[in-house]
Amino acid sequence: MMGKMTVLQTLLFSIPEAVAITWLACSLMGLKVSWKKVFLIGLLMGAAAHIIRHFAASYVVNVFFYNAGLVVILTFFQMGDWFKRIIAVILSTIIYLIIEFFNIKLLQSIYHSNPAVVLENTTLQFLWFIPQLVVAFIIVFVIIRYQLSLFNKPQQLADQEWNHDQELL
């Protein structure tokens, strides 16, 4: 079984992480979603993550059920079609895990600390958690600001090319 999280740790880590992953998924789908809806989904997913973590036998199983849960919740809120939801959720999770990996490696190399020491101290965990959350939100901002979604631009370009080809005929 994976390590148990306290309610405090869920509030400090799972919910903000779920908000970041949800917003990443929505921005990758090209959706303009209010922060209130993203926060609500993050709250639901953070609570679900707390429950899933208690029953998951391994981290891989945890991530699988987390992603499946997020796809279901995005379906409930009618966000994008199935293909877009699945791809966006998987990619947002991968992006977040990459951010987390580099954040931990960077902080370990800077502070020469043992990960076991960090895991025993909730304050230290939170301080190490903040940079990855900030980076995730910066990526969301860049995706939204520069319209770098996975699905909208190519379709818009294809529509423009189709219209242009039709005009030539």
Image (tube, grey):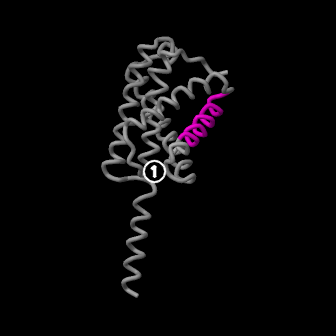
- Rendered position, 13 above or below 120: below
In the rendered image, the quadrant that contains the C terminus is: bottom left
Q: Is residue 111 magenta?
A: no
Q: Which residues are magenta?
A: 58-73
Examine the structure image and report whether residue 65 is included in the region drawn in magenta.
Answer: yes
Tell me the crowding category of disc 1: few under 14, some 14 to 19, or many 20 or more residues within 10 angstroms, Cα based: many
Residue ID at (51%, 16%): 7
Camera-side residue of 116 and 1? 1
Residue 119 image offset from top left, x and y in percent: 50, 16
Quarter of the image holding residue 109? top left
The quarter of the picture where residue 111 lies is top left
Q: Residue type at mark 1?
A: Met
Q: Is residue 48 visible?
A: yes
Q: Secondary structure at mark 1?
A: helix
Query: In terms of depth relative to the viewer, which is nearer, 57 or 109?
Result: 57
Side of 65 where 101 appears, left or right? left
Q: How many marks?
A: 1
Residue in the picture at 44% in, 33% down: 19
* Residue matched to label 1: 29
* Residue 101 appearing in the image: no
Rendered location of residue 137, percent (x, y): 36, 36
The picture places residue 147, in percent across and down from the top left corner, at 35, 53
Give the residue at x 55% y 17%: 5
